[in-house]
Amino acid sequence: MTSPGEKPFTLEEPDPDAGQKSKRMALVASKGGLDEVYPILIMATTAAALEWEVGIFCTFYGLDMVNTKRMHSLKVSPLGNAAAPPPLKGKEFGVPNFISMLPGMTTVATKMMRGWMKDSNIPDFDEMMELCLESGVEFYACATTMGVMNVKQEDIMPQATCLGAAAFLDFAADADLALFI
Amino acid sequence: MTIASDELLDCTGLLCPIPVVKTSKAIKTIDVGQVLEMVATDPGAPPDMEAWARQTGHELIEQTAGDGEYRFWFRRTK
């Protein structure tokens, strides 16, 4: 950072970051709800904009993020979520769990969240994934989860790499920041 | 406040992470030494854009706030 007393920037001044290794962030995506993958996508796109290297290990339900059969239809469940926002913006009344358990309520909650995101000009899941990929964010599909949940290699989006915990930890060991979400 | 800018990026009405992502893309479209002006309405923008400049090394020359609008001038350094 420059303080007012310091001399102004000149083109001849050497770049303080030149030749330095960029920072690295390792993320573990363990959940596959639409509301649960947004924090991952926001952290990843932001870190990439800060010119950090980003790798996301998609494991357990988080594998849905890179599963082409499921990634375009991620959902939000209103059931059992004490912090579920009221259905109408600005109105402070919650929905009782016994209503949230009725058939179709997951679809309703998902549509509602998509609507809120759209109204706030937040890109949808597909657009956020596109932003990640075009900025160089790497996706790793957990090999064990693929085996356990019977997900085939051809179901994983082609940009993702299939690997196990050892390979991810090898990447994460050199990270400046690691988050489990 | 008038600072000559080479490019103007409008991020009004956009929330985190989009202003940062768009600024990061836009700075690559101007030449080293040129100035990018960005305007946002997200109250999180001032600390976020300061952090972005710190992390990327691009220079935050000036910033202003008023009427719910935040304006930033960045010089591309690399």
Image (cartoon, helix red, strand yellow):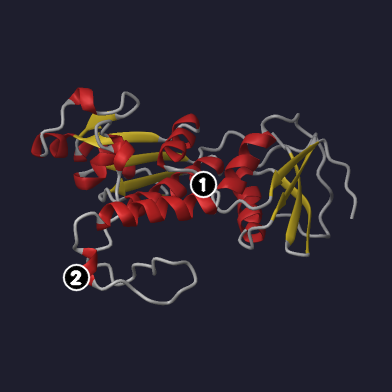
Q: Residues within 10 Å of mark 2 (few under 14, many from 20)?
A: few
For this orientation, the residue located farthest to the bottom is A92
Q: Is A89 placed left or right of A180 in the picture?
A: right
Q: Is residue A178 visible?
A: no
Please state which of the two labelled residues, at mark 1 or mark 2, is closer to the viewer: 2
From the viewer's perspective, is residue B18 above or below residue A151? Answer: below
**Residue at 24% in and 40% down:** A63
Q: Are marks 1 and 2 in contact (CB under 8 Å)?
A: no
Quadrant (top left, top right, bottom left, bottom right) of the N terminus of chain A: bottom right
Q: Nearer the viewer, residue A167 or B46?
A: B46
Q: Identify the residue at image location x=26%, y=51%.
A: A31
Query: As rendered, which of A96 and B24 lies closer to the eye?
Result: A96
Residue B50 placement (x, y as % from top left): 66, 55
Q: Is residue B61 left or right of residue A123?
A: right
Question: Which residue is at 30% across, 44% downward?
Answer: A74
Query: What chain does badge 1 belong to?
Result: A
Q: Which amino acid, mark 2? A: Phe
Image label count: 2
Q: Which mark is residue A46?
A: 1
Q: Say which quarter of the image contains residue A17.
A: top right
Instruction: Give the mark nearer the N terminus: 1 vs 2.
Output: 1
Disc 1 marks which amino acid? Answer: Thr
Q: Position of residue A176 (x, y in %)?
A: 42, 49
Q: Chain of mark 2?
A: A
| Mark seen at residue A87 | none
Along the line of sight, the residue nearer the viewer: A64 or A79: A79
- Per the model, the C-alpha gap separating discs 1 and 2 is 38 Å
| Nearest the eye: A128 or B25 | A128
Label 2, on which residue?
A: A98
Query: How dense is the environment of label 1, judged by Cα within 10 Å: few (below 14), some, or many (20 and up)?
Result: many
> Residue A16's x, y, as percent?
66, 42
Q: Secondary structure at mark 1?
A: helix
